[in-house]
Image (tube, rainbow, N blue to C red):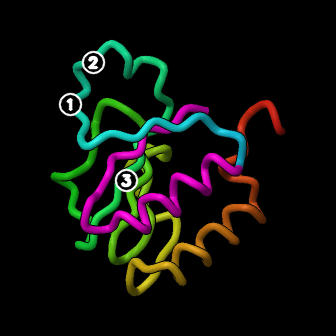
Amino acid sequence: MHYLVIENKQLEELTYDIVGFFWDNGNEISIQEGYTGKNNNYQRIDFIVSLDNCCFSEPHILKTKQFIHFCKDGVYSNVIPFPYRIFEFKDLNKHTLAAFFSWSKRLNLFKSSREL
């Protein structure tokens, strides 16, 4: 899988923890400051990954690609037909990210297709 991680300068350390998790699971990673959806290079991207320190808000969802969004109250994805919180926590920090990564590994959620 190829993940495009949208860089968040305010949460830079957490951004690179997320990048490391997907990379360590055998996935391709691209990092950039923003996403417009208009670049032809986006065709090879499977998921857009974003994070912020606010609660999830529907106007912020991406409609053009599958996404994984890390925010203050959990991890959301639109892989299911409607944006759905796949993991809940009270605050976005290193500890809650570690809990999410552990849970994801047990379920093999983000293993690259060549590893399955």
Classify the position of the C terminus by image quarter: top right
Q: Nearer the viewer, mark 1 or mark 3?
A: 1
Q: Nearer the viewer, residue 77 or 7?
A: 7
Q: CA distance from mark 1 to mark 3?
A: 19 Å
Q: Is residue 94 above or below residue 104?
A: below
How far apart, in angstroms, are the residues tagged by discs 2 and 1? 7 Å
Image coordinates of residue 16 in percent, x first then y, are: 47, 58
Are the two marked residues, 2 and 1, in contact with CB atoms closer than 8 angstroms? Answer: yes
Q: Is residue 7 above or below residue 2?
A: below
| Amino acid type of the residue that numbered disc 3 sits on in the rendered structure | Pro
- For the residue pair 79 and 104, the one nearer the viewer reads as 104
Residue 97 circle label: none
Relative side of 2 to 70, left or right: right
- Extreme top residue here? 40
Amino acid type indicated by mark 2: Asn
Q: Which residue is mark 2?
A: 39
Residue 107 image-quadrant placement:
bottom right
Circle 1 crowding by C-alpha within 10 Å: few under 14, some 14–19, many from 20:
few
- The residue identified by callout 1 is 36
Q: Which mark is residue 83?
A: 3
Q: Which residue shows up at 61% across the image and 33% down it?
A: 1
| Magenta residue span | 1-24
Q: Residue furthest left?
A: 59
Q: Residues within 10 Å of mark 3 (few under 14, many from 20)?
A: many
Q: Position of residue 113 (x, y in %)?
A: 74, 33
